[in-house]
Amino acid sequence: MRKWIPLFIIAAALAASAVVYPDLPERVPTHWNLKGEVDGWSPRAWGAWLMPVVIAFVWALMRWLPAIDPRRKNYEKFAGTFEGIMLSVMVFMLILHGITLAAALGYPVAMERVAPAAAGLLFIVIGNLLPRARSNWFVGIRTPWTLSSDRVWEKTHRVGGRLFVLGGILISLSALLGASWGHWFLLAVISVCSVGAVIYSYVEWRKEKIATAASTG
């Protein structure tokens, strides 16, 4: 049944657009500033159908990537995790699509709260999945050091997963406050989590190299 879930998500996005399309205005809001005010608009067709197409493209891309990965055999070891990451990203995009359509129809949408909250939840889900990912070229924390050592990969993804969960919690809490700096906070958390994981991977790789040199010397 799980293999049909991505198709249900794509169908839900298409159905939502089809149902509300006759009631959409000629211009659909597609961008909000840091205060949660609409500052970007798109034609009705573009606003209604772009996200369903993007969701379908993401699904097709993630179905195709394992086939061209030199480490494709590793995907068998974390197939459920890979599927979970793909589904969480697709659901996140579906939520954003629904919010955009609701705003276009005139419903009050506090984008400065909803978008960070959804992003925070996405971080928490992915953070919980990361430790189960196995070495590959497309999904996870891919640095020269994680890709050169399975041990460094596993340790980095355990620590990185915790960072992402903590970051997701902080982002979700900032969304509840509805602060004008929420988007900047989101970018700051993403940067800290990413840079922290990269630095940690290098440190662990250096430790491994030093230990290997000491044991062979």
Image (cartoon, rainbow, N blue to C red):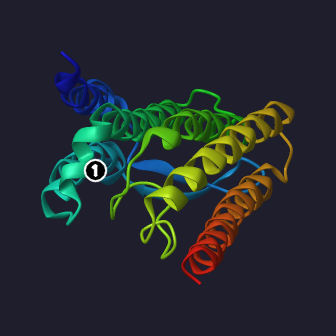
Residue at the spot 47% in from the left edge and 32% down from the top edge = 95
- Which quarter of the rendering shows the N terminus? top left
Is 94 placed left or right of 54 in the picture?
A: right
Can you see residue 150?
yes
Residue at the spot 82% in from the left edge and 39% down from the top edge = 174
Q: Work out which residue is located at the far top of the displayed protein and give it.
A: 1
Is 25 drawn above or below residue 137 in the view shown? above
Is 174 placed left or right of 138 in the picture?
A: right
Which percent across, then down, holds residue 97? 42, 38
Secondary structure under badge 1? helix
Which percent across, then down, holds residue 58? 28, 50
Q: What count of labels does the image hold? A: 1
Q: Which residue is mark 1?
A: 58
Residue at the spot 44% in from the left edge and 58% down from the top edge = 150
Question: Who is closer to the viewer here, 121 or 80?
Answer: 80
- Which quarter of the rendering shows the C terminus? bottom right
Is 102 placed left or right of 80 in the picture?
A: right
Question: Who is closer to the viewer here, 183 or 165?
Answer: 165
Which percent across, then down, holds residue 137? 33, 65
Can you see residue 57?
no
Question: Who is closer to the viewer here, 120 or 75?
Answer: 75
Q: Work out which residue is located at the far bottom of the displayed protein and give it.
A: 217
Is 192 placed left or right of 131 in the picture?
A: right
Residue at the spot 28% in from the left edge and 28% down from the top edge = 9
**The quadrant where residue 91 appears:** top left
**The quadrant where residue 67 appears:** bottom left
Is 116 drawn above or below residue 109 in the view shown? below
Q: What amino acid does circle 1 point to? A: Val
* Neighbours of disc 1 within 10 Å: few (<14), some (14-19), many (20+): some
